[in-house]
Amino acid sequence: MSKLILASASPRRQAILRHLKIPFEVHLATCKECVRAGDPVGTVGQNACMKALSVSKRYPRSVILAADTVVSFNGKVLGKPRDYEEAQAWLLDYSGRNQIVYTAVAFLKPGHRDPELFIEATSLVFKQYGLGTVQDYLDRVKPLDRAGAYDINECGDLLIHERIGSYTNVMGLPQSIVSAWVKANLSSKEMH
């Protein structure tokens, strides 16, 4: 029997798995994340695979689920902001503009050397807003641990005008990909 290990401390990813009623344990990856300038797809893909491989070394008999999320904005790949000032600058820059959120999901089965990798993209259009809205948002949400410096499901309506694509992808774990993979690869017996 293989248990599922989530290689992430993200409360949002954990909430999505609980919503799907998928039992899991959390064990954090010990690798350093990379940023490939101008290559959001390559960045998330490499990071998700490295995280899965890192955790599988410690838990070779488990199924590993790892994910990585970045924002592609204005030709740049944005991960988590360094501090409040950077978060504020990013959010001000988004006003009235579009961006794409990429999440890679890597699944690694016991005995396999390479993870199965899936990448989802969601487009966001931001409202027109000013410094007051940004400061209000940062005071309420404190999103320094989130890619792009915001959280769609925590006061996201203050900033986001329109979304094209998966909501849970912007949260950091595309629900449809995870649900489909688990149904296709893990028996219900393994999931209890």
Image: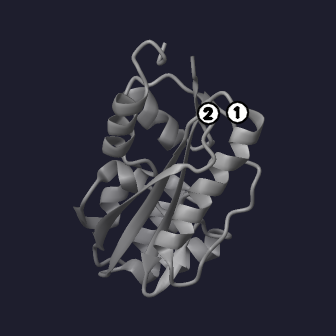
Q: How is the image coloured?
A: one colour
Residue 57 location (% of width, % of height): 75, 40
Regarding residue 146, the answer to whether it shows in the image is: yes
Nearest the camera: 110 or 170?
Answer: 110
Q: Quadrant of the N terminus?
A: top right
Q: Residue furthest bottom?
A: 75
- Where residue 137 sits, quadrant-wise, is bottom left
Residue where numbered disc 2 is placed: 110
Helix, strand or loop for disc 2: loop
**Horizontal relation, residue 70 to residue 83: left or right:** left
User: How busy is the neighbourhood of tag 1: few (under 14 within 10 Å), some, or many (20 plus)?
Assistant: some
Identify the amino acid type marked 2: Pro
Regarding residue 152, the answer to whether it shows in the image is: no
Q: Earlier in the sequence, mark 2 or mark 1?
A: 1
**Horizontal relation, residue 185 to residue 49: left or right:** left
Nearest the camera: 181 or 29?
Answer: 181
Residues at discs 2 and 1 in contact (Cβ within 8 Å): yes
Residue 36 location (% of width, % of height): 60, 78
**Residue 100 vertical placement versus 112 (above, below):** below
**Residue 71 vertical placement versus 140 (above, below):** below
Nearest the camera: 132 or 118?
Answer: 118
Residue where numbered disc 1 is placed: 60
Q: How many marks are shown on the rendered structure?
A: 2
Residue 71 location (% of width, % of height): 46, 70
**Horizontal relation, residue 86 to residue 58: left or right:** left
